[in-house]
Amino acid sequence: MITLYRAHPEPGVDSLDGIRSWTTSRSHAMRYVAGEFEGYGGPHLYVTEVKASLIVDLRPCEEYEKLRSVVIDLVGFDLNDLPIDLGYYHDLFREVAPIARARGFQWLAFCDEYPFSNVEEWLYLGSDPLTVREIETD
């Protein structure tokens, strides 16, 4: 099982749906809880446990051509066909996410480059709400 964390604005939530960002780093999630990145996260910390299956694994993601090759192999889609600026990986993955979901994948894992390099981030692609639990932040 893989433990993932997410800062969220609402307390007492037992499930989250939609494409949401998670991280394997509790300390990184805590930066969002603390409000370091205004407009993102929130004061409540949530955790979920996931099985390492049905993942489009794009880690590491330093080289575009390697990333492009992995996406073609795993998802069957060429990134060069996307009508977007490929300068920011996070935007790119949000474009790839619906394609991956349609092919049965539940998670997309990658290394985000903002606001810090090499922070492992996971996007939930599933259509069912994800079971979560709130944990203490201190």
Image (cartoon, rainbow, N blue to C red):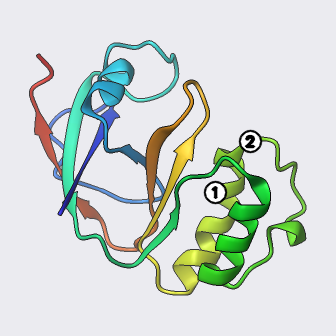
Q: Residues within 10 Å of mark 2 (few under 14, many from 20)?
A: few
Quarter holding the N terminus? bottom left
Residue highlighted by disc 1: 94
Which is more N-terminal, label 2 or label 1?
2
* Horizontal and vertical percent position of residue 19: 48, 57
Residue kind at label 2, given as amino acid type:
Tyr
Is residue 29 rendered to the left or right of residue 98? left
- Measured as percent of width and height from the top left, residue 85 is found at 87, 48
**Which disc, if any, is residue 88?**
2
Q: Would residue 58 appear left or right of 17 to someone viewing this image? A: right
Could you say which is closer to the camera, residue 86 or residue 61?
61
**Helix, strand or loop at disc 1?**
helix
What residue do we see at 82% from left, 42% from top?
Answer: 87
Q: Which of 46 and 1 is in front in this view?
A: 1
Say few, some or many: other residues with alpha carbon within 10 Å of mark 1 (under 14 / 14 to 19 / 20 or more): some
- Classify residue 64 by image quadrant: bottom right
- 48 to the left or right of 19: left
- Secondary structure of residue under mark 2: loop
Residue at position x 53%, y 77% in the image: 101
